[in-house]
Image (cartoon, grey):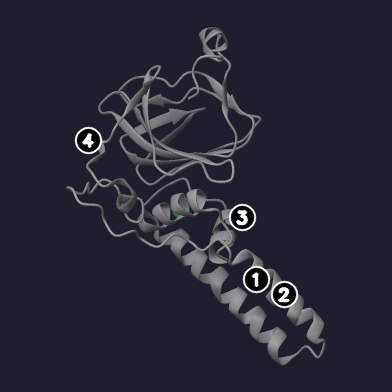
């Protein structure tokens, strides 16, 4: 059972089907590993359904009901990702669905690209300014110190890392926003694989990082 969870804001938006695909994919993959967040999504869905029923039966003001339904139609434009048919190739049981269906090979066999001390592979094309990547942080290695212009959500798939005093393991979600300047450190016993979604570019802030910023986009 994970110790660090998706925020209610994301779980509610997930229940409403209003999250952009990369974030919905991260939340759905966390849900596959987290019974307590699945239960919360279930209760949000129940509240949403009850609200609609109430509007149906109680309100005499059709315009209110129509306005709510119109809003729901707007947010329906971003459905939660269904599991994709698995691409041909061996599956990696460390990666839960629905993320597994996006990979098409074992984690180790993906087309990793070195980015400083970590390797990365892009999962989805950038989506409305949201970047989604898998990271492989070598055992005992720190990511370069960086901050964010936007927010970053990281789901641990295998191994673990420590960030600002918290220890994140498989299934945990680490959230960092623009106020956070950090350098997550992978556990020493195995490489850490995680899935990260950013809604703005990272900015390196360490001494070396500042020199590298113009050249590396991690
Ligand atoms: Zn959870």
Looking at the image, which residue is at 63% across and 35% down?
A: 150
Label 3 beta carbon less than 8 Å to ligand 1: no
Q: Disc 4 or disc 3, which is closer to the eye?
A: 4
CB within 8 Å, label 2 to label 1:
yes
Dot 1 lies on which element?
helix
Tell me the CA gap for discs 4 and 1. Answer: 41 Å
Label 4 SS:
helix
Q: Which mark is residue 96?
A: none
The mark nearer the N terminus, 4 or 3, is 3
Residue at 23% over, 34% down: 108
Label 2 and label 3: CA atoms lie apart by 19 Å
In the displayed structure, 213 sits above or below 178; it is above
Residue identified by numbered label 2: 68
* Residue of label 3: 9
Label 1 neighbour load within 10 Å: few <14, some 14-19, many 20+? some
Name which of mark 2 and mark 3 comes first in the sequence: 3
Alpha carbon of mark 3 to alpha carbon of mark 1: how far? Answer: 16 Å
**Residue identifier under label 4:** 109
User: Which of marks 1 and 3 precedes in the sequence?
Assistant: 3
- Residue 154, image x, y percentages: 46, 39
State how far apart marks 2 and 4 are (Cα). Answer: 47 Å
Q: Local crowd at mark 3 within 10 Å, few (<14), some, or many (≥20)?
A: few
Question: Which residue is identified by label 1?
Answer: 72
Q: CA distance from mark 4 to mark 3?
A: 35 Å
From the top left corner, tell me how far across and down residue 216 is, in percent: 49, 18
Q: How much space separates mark 2 and mark 1, taking CA atoms? A: 6 Å
Residue found 34% across the figure and 49% down from its top: 102
Binning the other alpha carbons within 10 Å of mark 2 as few (below 14), some (14 to 19) or many (20 upward) gives: some
């Amino acid at each position: 059972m994970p110790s660090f969870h998706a925020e209610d804001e994301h779980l509610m938006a997930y229940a409403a089907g209003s999250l952009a695909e990369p974030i919905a994919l991260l939340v759905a993959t966390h849900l596959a590993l987290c019974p307590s967040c699945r239960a919360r999504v279930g209760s949000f869905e129940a509240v949403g359904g009850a609200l609609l029923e109430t509007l149906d039966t109680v309100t005499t003001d059709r315009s209110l009901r129509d306005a709510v339904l119109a809003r729901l139609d707007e947010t329906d434009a971003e459905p939660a990702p269904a599991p994709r048919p698995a691409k041909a190739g061996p599956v990696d049981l460390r990666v839960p669905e629905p993320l597994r269906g996006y990979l098409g090979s074992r984690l180790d066999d993906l087309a990793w690209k070195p980015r400083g001390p970590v390797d990365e592979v892009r999962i989805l094309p950038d989506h409305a300014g949201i970047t989604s990547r898998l990271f492989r942080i070598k055992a005992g290695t720190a990511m370069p110190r960086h901050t964010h212009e936007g927010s970053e959500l990281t789901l641990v798939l295998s191994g673990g890392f420590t960030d600002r005093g918290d220890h994140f393991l498989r299934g945990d979600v680490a959230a960092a926003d623009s106020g956070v300047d950090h350098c997550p450190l992978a556990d020493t016993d195995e490489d850490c694989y995680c899935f990260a979604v950013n809604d703005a570019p990272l900015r390196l802030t360490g001494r070396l990082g500042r020199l590298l910023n113009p050249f590396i986009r991690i």
